[in-house]
Image (cartoon, grey):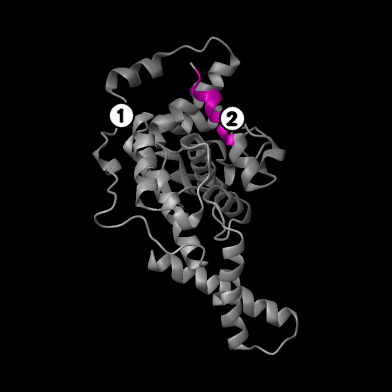
Amino acid sequence: MLNVQIRNVIRDITAAIDGQIANKSVINLNVIFNEVFGVKATEDQEDTEVTLREFLKAFIQENPDKIDQSSMNSYRTLLKSLISFEKDDITLSNLNVDYVNRFYDFLLKAGYKSNTIQTRFKKLKKLVNTAITRGLMTEYPFGKGKLTIPSSKADKRKFLVAEEIEKLMAFKPNNETERKVMMIVRFNLHVGMRIGDVLTLKKKDVIQGEHPTRGTIFRLVKTTSKTETDINIMLTAQAAEQIVEAGYFKNESDLIFPWLKEEDFANDFILYKAISSKQLFLIKP
């Protein structure tokens, strides 16, 4: 919580200094202090109380920490959950332990798994920290003795068993669309990447080389979009086969699996929506 507050304050102070420089003003730390921590904001707040959902909407639009669109979508989902939770909005000054406990019970009764609830509350805590930093609320409704969210690690991770993998490998596509879908499925059996990283996989991410004993090989070198993890692996013969079949040597598109269009890369939000729509299509029975 303190780290978040410190980062937000540094950002606000930097913005205030940049504003004085842009106005060709003499840097005055007292003015900056009053602008960032001043009483005026508190007086304005007393006149107009900011509500939780209003603040969340503004946060999504502002995106102060330049969060990627896949993460920002979690804030949009949080907003939908808060709207479903209670008809009336709540002011930030009234956001307390009782409210977050009731919100937790609501998510639990709605059938959400612990990892989903963890994500909702992680974003809510971030929002609360930002509101506290900006002087819009004072009480921190989380912490020791207040509310404990079960760890998502308790959920048992599910894996494909050998029989399921054999069925996938033996499946015979009935049309061209099914063939393209199964190409991605079979490729990912050997790579295990998120679907968004597979759909944005480009020729520059796959390096062709020669091995002294194995002959032609392919290495996958890519930074994942969500966790920014660097991947550098040699593709199996089966995965390389899917790369070649997808048109690695003949396809004019820069994408290995050309499901996305050029306009989908206009910005991060449009790309995220495009990937989400393709993901729903790919997993549809």
Residue 62 visible somewhere in the drawing: yes
Which badge, 1 or 2, comes first in the chain's sequence? 1
Q: Name the residue under label 2.
A: 277
Q: Is residue 277 magenta?
A: yes
Q: Position of residue 11 (x, y in %)?
A: 55, 71
Q: Where is residue 9 in the image (x, y as percent from the top left)?
A: 51, 72
* Figure check: 267 above or below 256: below
Q: Which residue lies furthest to the right in this view?
A: 23
Q: Please, what is the dominant secondary structure of the magenta stretch?
A: helix
Residue type, numbered disc 2: Ser
Residue type, numbered disc 1: Phe
Question: Going 64% across and 34% down the picture, which residue do you hit?
Answer: 260
Position of 216 with respect to 55 (left or right) is left
Image: magenta residue range: 275-284
Q: Nearer the viewer, residue 136 or 77?
A: 136
* Figure check: 182 above or below 7: above
Position of 149 with respect to 212 (left or right) is left
Cα distance between the residues tagged 1 and 2: 24 Å
Instruction: Between label 1 and label 2, give the one nearer the viewer.
Output: 2
Q: Nearer the viewer, residue 7 or 256?
A: 7
Q: Position of residue 97 (x, y in %)?
A: 35, 51
Q: In which quarter of the image is residue 17?
A: bottom right
Q: In which quarter of the image is residue 266?
A: top right
Give me the disc on residue 159.
1
Question: Going 32% across and 38% down the picture, which residue do you hit?
Answer: 114
